[in-house]
Image (tube, rainbow, N blue to C red):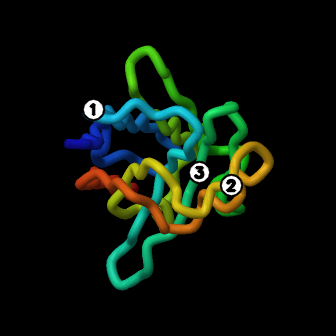
Amino acid sequence: HVQLVESGGGSVQVGGSLRLSCEVSGYTYSSICMAWFRQAPGKEREGVAAIDSTGSTTYADAVKGRFTISKDNAKNTLYLQMNSLSPADTGMYYCAADSLLYGGPGSVEYCLSPEYNYWGQGTQVTVS
C-alpha cells in the first residue's frame, strides 16, 4: 500500500518562504519521477517541479529561480523549498510519484504532466 503524505503548508506573508515535505511509504522508487503539483480554486492542477532518479530537475516557468525540488532517498522524502512567495502561489500542493510519461534519463520534462500512479492528499499554502 503506497502512501504519500505531504506536510509543511501554511499561511505566509508575501515574500516569505515555506518548505514542503512528502514522505513516501510502501514504495521503493528507483527509475521514476516525483513531482509537486498545485491547484488554485477554480483552476486546473499544474505541475510545479519534478525530479527524476538521476537528480535531474525541471520547473514551471512561474517558479523558476524561486522554488527548489530535492529528495532524500534514505528518508524516502521529497521536498519543495519555496522562496519569494506571492499570492499567485496560493493553492493546494500535492506530491506525486511514478510518472506514467517518464521515459528514463533525459525525459524529466514530461514529469510536469499530471499522469502519475500515486498522489498525496495535499497541503494548503496561502500567501497574503
Q: Amino acid at mark 3?
A: Ala
- Which SS class for mark 2? loop
Q: Quadrant of residue 90?
A: bottom left
Disc 1/disc 2 C-alpha distance (Å): 23 Å
The mark that comes first in sequence, 2 or 3, is 3
- Residue holding disc 1: 25
Q: Is residue 26 left or right of residue 116?
A: left
Residue 103 - label: 2
Question: Between 64 and 35, which is closer to the camera in this rendering?
Answer: 35
Q: Nearer the viewer, mark 1 or mark 3?
A: 1
Q: Residue at the spot x=49%, y=39% of the render? A: 80
Q: Nearer the viewer, mark 1 or mark 2?
A: 2
Q: Amino acid at mark 1?
A: Ser
Q: Amino acid at mark 2?
A: Gly
Q: Residue at the spot x=43%, y=62% of the render? A: 38
The mark that comes first in sequence, 1 or 2, is 1
Q: Residue at the spot x=48%, y=21% of the render? A: 73
- Residue holding disc 3: 49
Looking at the picture, how far across and down is residue 116, in whole percent? Answer: 44, 61
Question: Between 108 and 46, which is closer to the camera in this rendering?
Answer: 108
Disc 2/disc 3 C-alpha distance (Å): 17 Å
Q: Nearer the viewer, mark 2 or mark 3?
A: 2
Looking at the picture, how far across and down is residue 42, in whole percent? Answer: 35, 84
Circle 2: is it few (<14), some (14-19), or many (20+) Cα within 10 Å?
A: some
Looking at the picture, how far across and down is residue 100, in whole percent? Answer: 52, 61
- Which SS class for mark 3? strand
Circle 3: is it few (<14), some (14-19), or many (20+) Cα within 10 Å?
A: many
